[in-house]
Amino acid sequence: MKLIVFLSLFLFAQTLFAQQDKIKLGVFGDYTGQTSSFGISSFSGIKMAVEEINANGGINGKKLEIVILNDEGKPENTLFVVTKLIEEEKVDFLIGSPTSTNSLIAAALAQNAKIPMITPTATNPKVTEVGDYIFRACFVDSVQGEVMAKFAFETLKLRKIALIVDLGSDYSKGLTDSFTSNFKKLGGKIVSRQFYNQTEEDYGQLISAVKKTNPDAIYLPGYYNQVGEIAQEVRNQKMKVTLLGGDGWDSPTLFEIGKKALDNSYITNHFATSEPSDTVQNFVSVYKKLYNLEPDAFAALGFDSVYLLADALKRANSSEKSKVRDSLAETKNFNGVTGKFSFDENRNARKPVYMLKVGNGRFVYNSTVEQNILN
């Protein structure tokens, strides 16, 4: 009897030690569904970073363990999977989601549980406003909206812009608001505002309405599936306007759908594969070897999110959630593959914005805008 009790206690102690010897990362996103390219790329970057860190001995003597759940990009699924990660899997930290609408749901759950959460790519300002345990590795919509407004007015000399907005996306609406206010402030004019939803099957009437207003360009802050189809319809109706967008365009699938209709468009983004620094080029090289693909911004931001957390864990010299939260908030001059950045008082990354031009089925680096020159 004593032997049985001893063995039971020994096995329990082993299990407890094994758990304490790991740091569990709850990772969630859309790995199937409308915007699955975002989730897959983000997780590829996350996985690459975790494997690198573990190969180099882990953090504070502990290895990182990923617990990954698919929310299919559906808000109701995000509620379920994040609750499961927190209550059943007992994760220490959360990384996700790629999209703003789902990140808002996850943020409320993480804040309530006092679990630090980093969203790699959710750009809506409301995400970090949920509470002090929520961080983002990307810049916010207001930043890229302002950068694109200035680029359109001052560099491209555009004066009349039509807006095409995804009605069901907090991301699209946030970018539209920022772009509109800044473009008007510069002296530009918004000549049309049209809306669509992600299940739209025919964009003919929408583009006809835009065409009547004779814009110089169309600002289209949506996701790649719909952007590709809308671009095709714009060219089908013989419109020669410049198309402008944001980081939601960043997917190889965009070019499969939009093809040549996207040429000579411009987007704001978090990452440029052609940026010449050793940090970027080493990341691109290793990523290509692992996945036989060129990394996009979602992969780069997923990668940076893990290293941001690792940096905070090392500086805190602890896995205690409140201490890591404080350490994350104190991040200064973090040198990531998406640029050198610090967190502001709202836990948003102050970092460079890359302007990319679309041509021949790829994004080409155009210029860099540092946030400290913005209003």
Image (cartoon, rainbow, N blue to C red):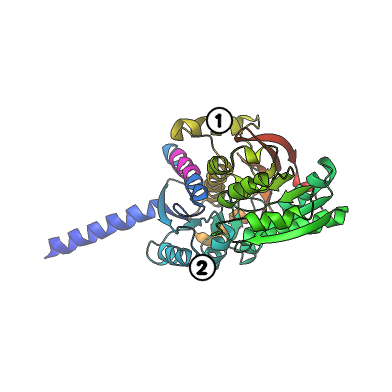
Q: Earlier in the sequence, mark 2 or mark 1?
A: 2
- Identify which residue is drawn at 40% across, 50% down: 65
Name above or below for residue 5 compared with residue 40: below
Q: Dividing the picture into quarters, in which one does residue 81 lie?
A: bottom left
- Label 2 to label 1: alpha-carbon separation: 36 Å
Question: As shown in the figure, which amino acid type bears the numbered disc 2?
Answer: Leu
Magenta stretch mostly in which secondary structure?
A: helix
Q: Name the residue under label 1.
A: 282
Is the residue marked by circle 2 packed among few (<14), some (14-19), or many (20+) residues within 10 Å?
Answer: some
Outermost bottom residue: 112
- Identify which residue is drawn at 59% across, 35% down: 361
Name above or below for residue 309 compared with residue 113: above
- Identify which residue is drawn at 54% across, 62% down: 102
How far across and how far down the image is residue 166, in percent? 63, 59
Q: Are marks 2 and 1 in contact (CB under 8 Å)?
A: no
Q: Left or right: 47 with respect to 131? A: left
Q: Which region is colored magenta?
A: 44-52
Q: Does the magenta stretch include residue 176?
A: no
- Identify which residue is drawn at 73% across, 39% down: 368
How far across and how far down the image is residue 211, in percent? 74, 52
Q: Mark 2 points at which residue?
A: 109
How far across and how far down the image is residue 337, in percent? 60, 39
